[in-house]
Image (tube, helix red, strand yellow):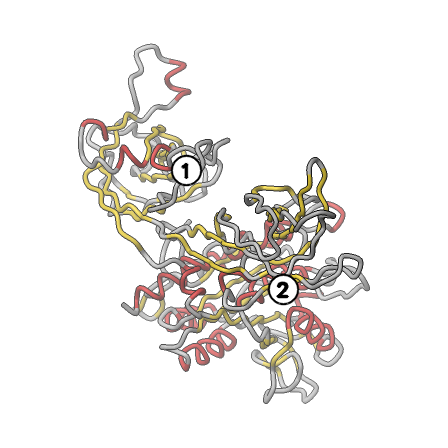
Amino acid sequence: MDSGTPMTRVELSVSAKNLRDRDTIGKSDPVCILYIKGSGQDEFVEVDRTEMIENEHNPQWIKKFQLDYRFEEKQGLSRDHIHINWSFVHVTNAHQTVLVFLPTTLVGIPVRCHEARSGYLSSRLGAALLLPISDVNLIATKLIRCLIITTDELDAGNFYCNAEKLLMFYEDNKTSFDRPELKSEVLKGTLNPVWKPMVMPVRCLEGNKKSENEGNSEEANIKIECYDWDDDGGHDLIGVCYTNLGRLLKGPSDENVYPLINEKKKAKKHSYKNSGQLILKGVNTHKETTFLEYLHQGTQIHFTVAIDFTASNNAEGHSPLHHIQPGVDNHYSHCIKAVGEIIQDYDLDKLFPALGFGAKLPSGDVSHEFFLNGHPDNPYCHGVHGILEAYHNSLSTVKLHGPTNFAPVINHVAGIARSHQGHNDYFVLLIITDGEITDLLETQQALVAASQEPMSVIIVGVGDADFSSMELLDGDEKRVSASGKSAIRDIVQFVEFRKFAKSGGKVCRSSLATAVLKELPSQFLAFMKTKK
């Protein structure tokens, strides 16, 4: 979990030109309605609408639409991801006449806001309609940097290990605290930990007045959970407290001393008071450039995929992972689509190199860095469809071999990224593999070097192999190191495909994409900070 990725709220102003009259007496009275279809939803749902402007062919609505932007969730083009559709509606008395239904996606608006979004009325409705996104405002997001320390002794939790403490912060989404917004560092060996300053994204929007029903963002509840941390993921809850932004901004005071309450212990013991206290020792606010703001300013995300062609993909006793069946995606195809269909919206030309490793080529040479389309001088595939086509074709031209070496493809992309230092480019390498890595030291060395370049590495493990060595590459808990050097930042995200596979061969592709891509914005921002 990232500890300091600013949330971006996008504000859109819309207008229209050349609307055709639908009134029999006067001009049209247009309204713009925003529909969103969320992950897992089959239908578009109305979420907001502008005011109605009477008798106007070229409306410029005052009402603005505001949307939260999440890189890993709201950019997809398939129905499993969030889409945004605009509908212009002519309103006369009690009935509505739809004039146009114009699909678009949230990512296309802020990334390419200089382009007019155009739609056309059907022939039965007549003249063309131009829909420009007349103004896109990436609303400034405050972040609070707070230092928290415990004074009263925390409950010991695990008596057989050194006390290892972890804080997790949740922001109220009006129905529950189901998504952690921030996770602290893990502090070991103390019942009175002092955490380093943490950057907490807060949707406290300067100059933005929400509707009365939404309330003041400074009053939104923040839930803080304190855990006794275990490396197996089975953390033991010490206690919980609640606060809000307005209270935190008051700084150190008696009001910012928080008893940690464990409801289970409280229910068992009448004399129970708390399981320790958290005390705010300092706070300040500042503004950081968000991931979406960098995209808005011209940054492009470049996508490369590297596919494992080792013989273990056809291991005896298991279904061949590279098996191609018409109309059915194998694990590799699922991964390419889940990631590629999101990332391709951030690359204007949508030309992606596709690599393979661990195969015996038609020449008889074993290669750990070859282009799937067989053209080193022009290795690009057009869009996700082009990647899949090159992948399928390569299965008939190369032989599965081995071993499983990652370093060559990592070094390949790192070299390209190095040549683009100082430009508005960031590179993402997706490695899809079925087995345990065989060049671990070389890969660690490659990742340490690559951490200085504008790139991230996503590894998806398919099949039923032991992927424990992959966890050593994912630097969430500890930075990758090799030969006495450590990576300057975490650039790797590892995910096991089987966690998203359902019965009947179905795959929750939207959840896979979220898990795979959730750390990319924070990794990008960490790189940008190294350049300051």
Q: Secondary structure at mark 1?
A: strand
- Measuring 53% from the left and 62% from the top, which residue is drawn there? 459
Q: Is residue 301 left or right of residue 187?
A: right
Task: Name the residue that disc number 1 marks.
Answer: 171
| Classed neighbour count for the residue bearing mark 2: other residues with Cα under 10 Å, few (<14), some (14–19), many (≥20) | some
Q: Amino acid at mark 2?
A: Ser
Residue 277 placed where, x, y %?
25, 28
Residue 354 placed where, x, y %?
60, 75
Could you tell me how far apart the alpha carbons at marks 1 and 2 are, in whole angstroms? 37 Å
Q: Is residue 389 left or right of residue 367?
A: right
**Badge number at residue 328:** none
Mark nearer the N terminus (1 vs 2): 2
Task: Name the residue that disc number 2 marks.
Answer: 118
Q: Is residue 512 above or below residue 242?
A: below
Q: Secondary structure at mark 2?
A: strand
Camera-near label (1 vs 2) is 2
Residue farthest toward the front in the current orientation of the protein: 25
Q: Is residue 161 above or below residue 448?
A: above
Q: Nearer the viewer, residue 223 or 499?
A: 223
Residue 227 placed where, x, y %?
36, 35
Could one spot residue 121 in this view of the protein? Answer: yes
Q: Nearer the viewer, residue 390 or 268?
A: 390
